[in-house]
Amino acid sequence: MKIPQRGTAAADLFDQLEAYRANDLQWRGGRAFAYVYHAGAEAEAVAKEAYSRYLSVNGLDFTVFPSVRRLETEVAAMCASHLSAGPEAVGSFTSGGTESIMLAVKAARGAAKAKGGVPGTPEVILPVTAHAAFHKAAHYLGMKCVSIPVERATMQVNVADVAAAINENTVMLVGSATSYGPGVVDPIAELGELAQRHALWLHVDGCIGGFMIPYFRRLGAAIPDFDFRIPGVSSISMDLHKYGFAPKGASVVMYRTAEHRRHQMFAFSGWTGYTIVNHTVQSSKSGGPLAAAWAVMRFLGDEGYLAIAEKLWEATNAICDGIEAMDGIELLVRPQMCLIAACSTSVNI
Ligand SMILES: *Cc1c(COP(=O)(O)O)cnc(C)c1O
């Protein structure tokens, strides 16, 4: 394909776009898991309007677009207070869970280096159930991941195994809240104690679970503390484009203090162009995802999210009860999140 010599009428282009997506996942019918998180037509309309108003705004430079910085600070503050952070906490808005995790891994690597560094390749110790984004971050950042098995009964990482894997090159421990698939929270309090004992960075990956589990707890679910209430937690990632119901391109990475975030930054003035001061991976970026996330969070509000959580938790438990009552298929584990993993030794799953 070449750039067409003559422009095409807008109506024709939109027809073509609709035709192109005929074979895409149909996510509005209530039968699609993951990929698209839909909180109804009203929230979608609010997101669209906010997104389009900030579509062409550039998040590159907050001295030129100070409203972007304000939106980011407000979104980060809402997220940090949702996860019981103290007044010292800071957060950054990113394009997704992968970027949030990559930045936290970079910050942990930088913090270790500032304390004198490690003799070999810096290592991240993580449960085998932790998201592949950590392996991607290690790949990008010249680090090594050490995967630790989980207990079959609980699908949680064994903290003694994590402790045994700590060595002079370890810079970061990871726990999920929750894991993707099994939907369980790792023993974050024990990991926090371990991290403190060895002066290590502990990251909690709340990309999928972080937003909803505070609501499930309020609804009575037996889920232990997993957030900044645990003193050893250094950073938490939480996606807004999953159970925050914001459109894609929306996540936050939060840190206990600004000092923790210091090594996330990149600044450079040694070229002939403009001075670069980037706190995230992207440099020029649309303000759309940020404005949409800000608008959806404030449109739904705490009550709106709690009402959604109630339906999700009820449906999760109904499906889990149903699976438990069936022969030939069983739950991998009873989830602490609206994620369900089923398995079988007798039927083709
Ligand atoms: C989705 C997910 C990620 C990665 O997020 P992206 O937004 O897809 O980059 C990381 N961790 C967990 C637990 C996730 O569910």
Image (tube, rainbow, N blue to C red):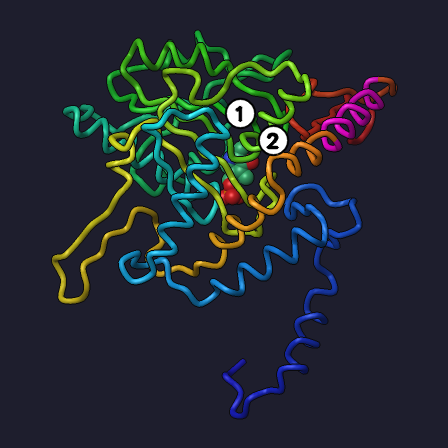
Q: Is residue 288 above or below residue 81?
A: below
Q: Position of residue 90 (x, y in %)?
A: 35, 35
Q: Residues within 10 Å of mark 2 (few under 14, many from 20)?
A: many
Q: Is residue 177 left or right of residue 305?
A: left
Q: CA distance from mark 1 to mark 2?
A: 10 Å
Which residue corresponds to the image point at 47% horizontal and 35% vertical from the top-left?
Answer: 79
Which amino acid, by three-letter code, is at mark 1? Ala
Q: On the image, numbered disc 1 is attached to which residue?
A: 177
Asked which secondary structure carries label 2, the reply is: loop
Let me know if residue 193 is in the magenta part: no
Instruction: Give the overall secondary structure of the magenta segment.
Output: helix
Quadrant (top left/top right/bottom left/bottom right) for the C terminus? top right
Let me know if residue 322 is in the magenta part: yes
Which amino acid, by three-letter code, is at mark 2? Met
The disc placed on residue 212 is 2
Quadrant (top left/top right/bottom left/bottom right) for the N terminus? bottom right
Magenta span of residues: 311-324
Q: Position of residue 34 (x, y in %)?
A: 65, 42
